[in-house]
Image (spheres, rainbow, N blue to C red):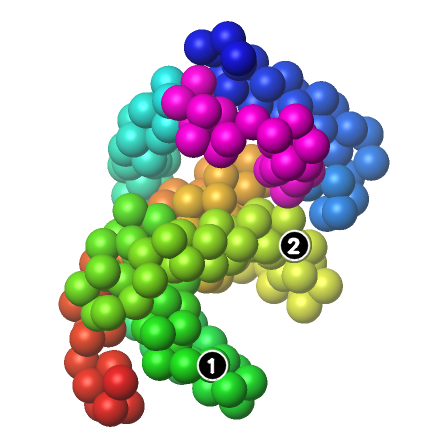
Amino acid sequence: MPETFGIFATLLLYWLFSGLYARKRSPLLNPVLLSIAAIATFLWISGIPYEDYMASARFLSFLLGPAVVSLAVPVYKQRRIIAEYGKEIAVGIAFGCLTAFFSVYLIAKGLGAGEDILRSLAPKSVTTAIAVGVSEKIGGIPALTAVFVILTGIMGNAFGVELMKFLRIRDRVARGLAMGVTSHGLGTARIILDDELSGAVSGLAMALNGVLTAVILPYLLRLLNL
């Protein structure tokens, strides 16, 4: 396999599916969702190891860091409005952090999930780098946590905006908060396409929710005797 196969395959698929999504605008045609599904299917059929694909796409992985840092730009540009809604954003992040944890805990517990699964699921709503580190510290399974985080982000990216339209949530700050707290970077990447203020709030919420989750999660697990 060529050393740059992963880069070109990923970009080509995303470009093709983005064009399809621009024509149909259906959440089921979400380019992130379809690109991941197409690459996974191709690797499965071809027998190419996932590690080889990732090695050939490492440059794209490297760009994730600068891409996340670049979210500071819309936050700076929208700083006056963000400061105006500072209290609402802070309360929303705290409430969203607790809701994300207790909702997944109660659902997984009700379905009979074991302790290791519960610990792996707990940080699913924060960005992968933080979630994997938190999972290691609280006794979860980091690889499983990464899968949950990516699935959460894909669902938010594909269906988050459509769900808010259905629920008639039109406030730009509230829309950004919802996406950032529930579906981290992938949700932020989606909402920023619609509105810069919502994207700026989403990026800020993603970052602060990651920090808050890392700090309070051990205490929440101890409260539940996990």
Magenta range: 31-57
Indicate the secondary structure of the residue bearing disc 1: loop
Label 2: how many residues lie within 10 Å, few (<14), some (14-19) or many (20+)? some
Q: Residues within 10 Å of mark 1 (few under 14, many from 20)?
A: some
Q: Position of residue 98 (x, y in %)?
A: 35, 77
Q: Position of residue 92 (x, y in %)?
A: 37, 69
First in sequence: mark 2 vs mark 1: 1
Q: Which residue is mark 1?
A: 113
Instruction: In this rendered view, identify the residue nearer to me: 87 or 100.
Output: 100
* Amino acid at circle 2: Phe
Q: Quadrant of residue 10?
A: top right
Residue at the image point whose x is 29% and y is 47% from the top: 129
Residue 87, horizontal then vertical, whole percent: 28, 67
Tally of marks: 2
What residue sits right under mark 2 in the picture? 159
Quadrant of res 61: top left
Residue type at numbered disc 1: Ala
Residue 35 among magenta residues:
yes
Q: Position of residue 116 (x, y in %)?
A: 35, 74
